[in-house]
Amino acid sequence: MIAKAIIEARMTSTRLPGKVVMPILGRPTLELLIERLQRAQCLDGIVVATTTNATDDVLEALAAKLGVECFRGSEDDVLSRVLGAAQASNTELIVEITGDCPLVDPAIVDQLIGIYRANSYDYVSNTLKRTYPRGLDVQVFSASTLGEVARLTDDPVDHEHVSLYIYEHPERFRLYNLESGLSEKYWDLRLTVDTPEDFALIRDIYERLYPVNPTFAMKDVLLLLDQQPDLLDLNRHIRQKAVR
C-alpha cells in the first residue's frame, strides 16, 4: 500500500492564527514538521491538506518550495479534505498528522505503519490511551476505511475530526493503540502548538536541540525537559479543547 503522511494545516486556526508558518530558527513550523516526516523510512510521500481560502495560498507555495504535494479542500469538512487529498495523491494508507505537531517523531511513524502492515487492523495509533506526550500523535488507516466513514456519517463533528468516527465505533472497526512504555510523568506533557504559550515551549525546545542535532528524537526532548523542567511552566496551564 502506498503510504503518505497527510498533514492538516490552515492559517485560520482559532486560538493561534498562522501558527503553521510562525518562525522557529528562521523557518516556518510546518517546514520543520515536514523535514521530520521526510526522515520516516516507511512513508512514500507527504501531502499538505489545506483549504481553498486565499489565506492558505502561502501553504500551497511552501509545499511547492519543499517539493511535497498539496491538496486544497473544505475548511470545515476536514474529513472530505483528507479523503480528497488521499484520492488525488494516490494514497492508499493515510498517516494522519496535524500541522500543530512539529515534534512528531519519524521513528514512531515508522513503527505504527509497520504495525498496520503486519496485522489486520483498520486503525492504528498512539492516541487511544494517551501514553505519549500530546503533540506526538500519529494515526494510520486506509483511504478505503475513510471513504466508508464518509458514507456512514453526516455528523459535522465527525467531519471536523477526521478519524473520530473510526475510534468511536470499535464494534465496526478493528483498533490498535501503541503504548509508549514511558513513565506516567510524561503522559500529560503538552508538546503541540495551539496557543502562544505552546509555541513558546516548542520554539525553546527547537532552539536548544536543533542546532546541536537536527535529527533529535522524542528521547532527546524528554531528556531536555528533565534537565530544564522550568520550560514546562510556559504552557502548563493550557487545556486541550474538547472534541465533543
Image (cartoon, grey):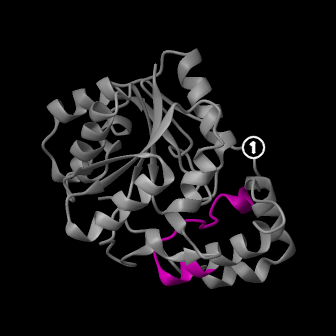
| Residue 135 shows in this picture | no
Residue at image point 46% right, 19% down: 1
Segment colored magenta: 184-200
Residue type, numbered disc 1: Gly
Q: Is residue 156 visible?
A: yes
Q: Position of residue 20 (x, y in %)?
A: 45, 68
Q: Name the quadrant containing residue 106.
A: top right
Q: Quadrant of residue 171?
A: top left
Q: Which residue is mark 1?
A: 181
Residue closer to the observer: 220 or 69: 69
Q: How many marks?
A: 1
Q: Residue at x 78, y 67 (%)?
A: 209
Does the magenta segment cover residue 197?
Answer: yes
Q: Residues within 10 Å of mark 1 (few under 14, many from 20)?
A: few
The secondary structure type at the circle numbered 1 is loop
| Residue under the point 58% across and 51% down | 130
